[in-house]
Image (tube, rainbow, N blue to C red):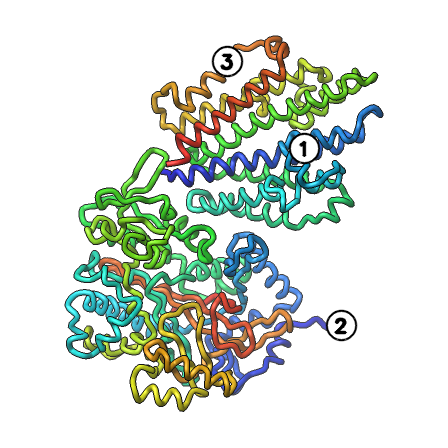
Amino acid sequence: MMLSRTANSLFWIGRYIERIEHLARYINAQYLSSSDAPSAFDKQLTLESMLFMASAAQSFQEYSPQIVDHQVIYFLTLEDQNPYSIKNYVALVRENARGVRDNTPTELWEAINRFYHAMNVFTREEMEKKGPYDFCKSAMDTTTIIKGVADNTLLRNEVWSLIRTGIHLERATQITQIILSKLQDIRKTEESPMSQAIQSYHWAALLRSAGGLDMSRHYYGTTPNRERAIDFLLLNQKFPKSVLYNLEKLKADLKIISNNKPISPDSVEFTVGKLTANMNFLTLDEILAQAEKFLHDLQQTLIRIGAQIEQQYLTF
Amino acid sequence: MIQEKYLENLFREYSRTSEFLDEVFDENGQIRQHYQRVYNHLAKISLPDFKYLNDYAKKSSFDQGITFNVYSDKSQGVERIFPFDLFPRIIPTKEWEKIEKGLIQRNRALNLFLQDIYNEKKILKDNVVPKELIFSSRHYCKHMMDFVPYGGIYVHISGTDIIKHKDGEYYVLEDNLRCPSGVSYVLSNRMATKRILPNLFFKSRVQPVVDYPEALAEVIKSVAPIGVDQPVCVVLTPGMYNSAYYEHSYLALQMGMQLVEGRDLFVDHNFVYMKTIHGPKKVDVIYRRIDDDFIDPMVFRADSTLGIPGLMSAFREGNVSLVNAPGTGVADDKAVYTYVPDMIRYYLSEEPILKNVFTYRCEKGDDFLYVLENLDKLVVKPVDESGGYGIFIGSKASRQEQEDFKEIIKANRRKYIAQPIMSLSVHSTFIEENERFEPRHVDLRTFSLSGYQIEYVCKGGLTRVALRKGNLIVNSSQGGGSKDTWVLQE
């Protein structure tokens, strides 16, 4: 017996927590790896890449005429005016968590509440002086703690499954966006004479931004390239951040939420099932032939899945 | 070498006052017997250690999110914790027994009174309580007429405020019969004490308060509509921006009940349902923390977005129970308060166990004249405000302010009552800015429950402290703090 409003909050707690983690990791990874960049590489590009990944290019343009590093980082992390800054996402997580206190253990609320207060301690001055590392590290660590607390305390019922649904859908969406953003970075530097060096740098950065560089090296026993990076992030069945892995989990969680109801063609269970089946029988070559188109289509389907979940379970 | 300061030194510098009763120290400056153990324990703590514990208590409330919002539209910087003082307030067994009996007696009479004035109106016909007083009250709810809620219980949860006067007697300051709040602080203060002063607490044989949520759940279930076997009970909150939201969610969690907002419920054919992910689910009892005015826009305020259209009609059909029932505000009005001792005699044929503060009713001719002439010695209160708003303290007002206030009273005599300035007792309290203990005024919010064949009083309550020196109003929205309240076991 769960209220639709509660379901809505749980779903968005999952989504926002996951979004915060990916944003923080991406900002951090981009910022750090820009210092390793070959000389041809333009610092400007890392900043544009951050904004693209956060889908904030346009709103930043309205915020500041020039793309300056500390401005971009502040905008994405702490800026109150930016409704999609990490700090504001944390406030949204807390607000949603506060609304479902009767359904969730005290430990989960306290972890989220501490996160909120910890984020409020960071200042612009400090961020400009020290860079985003401390902030991003703290955000990544804390989202992991919160997910761990949820993992260790929640009953395996629809409360758990709704948070997981949010997490898996968001993770698939973010990974898709990260790949897209990297493909775009590479396209922008294609004319450069050092292209080859830059490319291998980019594939490593892509995997690092998704938190999968070490495990990909381990899995393939060699350094990343285009094929291996895309394969690992989209199709790997064992990597918990790959899109396919998350779709499989999403399918399982929706089954718990729907109470094993038979699937009708207009249901979200159907859309997820079909997408998962498709991706299970897709070859890497088919994807690489039209990588960006494939990713855009995938993104559209993920958006539709979100809308269907909303319509089916989160609104009454 | 600088000698470390211990609380013992601080207590030695404690400035006693002879003007008020001090809960901890007697007239000769000696520790009262029931405080001896706590005193001995605290005295041996060094000041830096104590400050550390004090900060720990604050951080713990903050982490738990036990914050309340001060009315404001800003989204940040308005979350405050309700300051918690580590020096507990102690009530000896004998004194508590009397309080408990008195509260139960009072609540029985108030429930009978409500049933009477909405139905037979005997007490009005017998001229024990003037009927003008009742029918002119803003809180008299005509939608409750000729209807008796399940078990004849109107007030399931009552928050009676009590003070200890200079004469050593407890007096009832006011009844809170609508949606009394504060019990979550009682529970979280106790939790904090157990964490911070475990050795002291476990040696002290204190009556538990943790059974409150369980007792409340029992009471709520006991008034489920007839024929409902496994009642679905919910807690109805105005939402997370309400200043008492922490309490609503805390109680729901502790009782294992769903916390709902008005928009989560709807009424169909006089039954109430909640909107779940698998369709509508019938609701049997609603512990509502929304004021009467807002619970049903079809009956009360039409602009309310917090309520559920049709709820009152479902209630009157007996398909859903409301805790507390609507219309109870008429009995906690400060003018009606003055008649509670008469009600006790009238309905129960008993003498009141707890005293009322003597009250002048401005609508009565003699009383009115007395109030005008003695304004400087009185506290004047509007009868229908809560939260300490609108209170006029004669002794603190300038001559001009007194004159102005007389005009205000004259314009609406029914609205004001006056009481002699009660000397609320004081309690030794740690004042952070001064790093020492100072006497501060305290009162006690008690929590009593009445269900079908259940009567329960929480053994303890919320001791509220007026943190501002000399301030007599002890309300969280007016810079108050609180203390854990220990009722000792025999």
- Give the residue pinned by disc 3: A278
Classify the position of the N terminus of chain B by image quarter. Answer: bottom right
Q: Which residue is mark 2?
A: B2
Residue shown at 71%/34% (left/top)?
A28
The image's mark for residue A51 is 1
In the image: residue A119, left or right of residue B183:
right
The residues tagged by marks 2 and 1 sit, at their Cα atoms, a distance apart of 58 Å
Chain under disc 2: B
Which of marks 3 and 1 precedes in the sequence?
1
Examine the rendered structure and indicate whether residue B18 appears above or below residue B262.
below
The answer to whether one can see residue A214 in this image is no
Comparing marks 1 and 3, which lies closer to the viewer?
1
Residue A144 position by quadrant: top right
- The circle drawn on residue A296 is none
Tell me the residue at 27%/75% (across/down).
B340
Mark 3 element type = helix
Residue B485 location in percent, x, y? 45, 67
Q: Residue at x 84, y 25 (%)?
A: A39
> Label 3: few (<14), some or many (≥20) within 10 Å?
few
